[in-house]
Image (tube, rainbow, N blue to C red):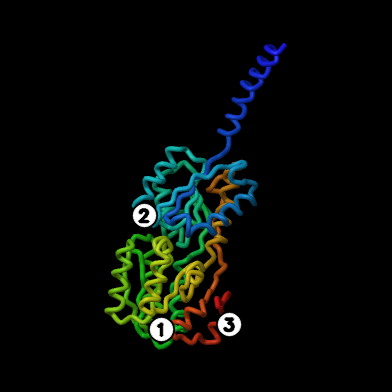
Amino acid sequence: MRRRNFITLLGSAAAAWPLAARAQQAMPVIGFLSIEPLETSRDQVTAFRRGLSEAGYVEGQNVTIEYRWAEGQADRLPAMAADLVRRRVAVIATLANVAAVVAKAATTTIPIVFGIGGDPVKLGLVASLNQPGVNITGASFLSSAVMAKMLEILHDAAPNTAVIAALVNPTNPQAEADTREALEAARVLALQVHVLNARNKSDIDAAFITLVQRHAGALLIEGDGLFVTRMKQLVVLTARHAIPAIYQGRDFPDAGGLLSYGASRADALRIAGVYTGRILKGEKPADLPVQQSTKVELILNLATARALGLTIPPTLLARADEVIE
């Protein structure tokens, strides 16, 4: 009797094991490619997962996510993208302009969904916003379109500064457009702008030496993944040199930076999560038009302003979406 029960149980387990294995294998896998490290991307990942859940997918329950963090090193992205392609993930989701460009170069068959700050048409990612292409779509928060506004806000915060530095990563596909926009805005405001390039941590240190040598009184920082990964370094350097600076991304004022202005990355990544879920359900990227997030935020750290000896105009305070005391 015992032997018969044991054989029955063994047979049931043998039958159940392939079913469980097939269920596990059937769970789709998303490849998540980012130039930034995890510690500076938690809010974005949370927003992406929120969008996925809106589409009916929860990580660990009915979808798996393979994360690849380039830690601010763009040269690591091609190998990471190639690895995701070899693993035959169902969708590749990307953060940042350069990650999206690399993903597109890696595959023409695996669907790609981006949440980026550049113009996807100018970057060559899509043919048009309404008809993106064969295997790629997503959402844009158009960080490059705010460079002029950032310079204007910085000038309002530090009106006695006539010479301003602009920190740009030349490896960013949007760098040329960002630089052009900053220079044009400076011409309109009758300001002198020195463009400083930085590709890595050492370049950032060197840029601040040049900034001091050129007597720049304020700093405009491009919205780039490298600068997000070096947030602490930038905030420390601007404090050390008593330089008013404006950044893209609210994490900077939270960390002690003076100002941030830009579109909401979280909103764009929530949309990217929704699109990823819809693609997993069978929709094609070519049928999903690129969406543009229009929500922008101005965040001001008043404690940092006081430390810099700045008196923030009431008009600028009134415009701020959030003031950190």
- Type of the residue with mark 3: Ala
Q: Which residue is mark 3?
A: 318
Name the residue at 33% across, 61% down. 200
Q: How far apart are the two marked residues, 3 and 1, measured between alpha carbons?
A: 22 Å
- Type of the residue with mark 1: Leu
Whether the residues at callouts 3 and 1 have beta carbons within 8 Å, the answer is no
> Which quarter shows the C terminus?
bottom right
Kindly report which numbered mark, 3 or 1, lies closer to the viewer in this rendering. Answer: 3
Q: Earlier in the sequence, mark 3 or mark 1?
A: 1
Name the residue at 41% across, 58% down. 123
Q: Which residue is mark 1?
A: 189
Q: How far apart are the two marked residues, 3 and 2, measured between alpha carbons?
A: 38 Å
Name the residue at 42% across, 66% down. 232
Q: Which residue is mark 2?
A: 74
- In the picture, measured across the screen, residue 126 lies left or right of residue 297, that is left
Mark 1 packing: few (<14 Cα in 10 Å), some, or many (20+)?
A: some
The residue tagged with tag 1: helix, strand or loop?
loop
Q: Position of residue 242 (x, y in %)?
A: 38, 80
Kindly report which numbered mark, 2 or 1, lies closer to the viewer in this rendering. Answer: 2
Residue 247 appearing in the image:
yes
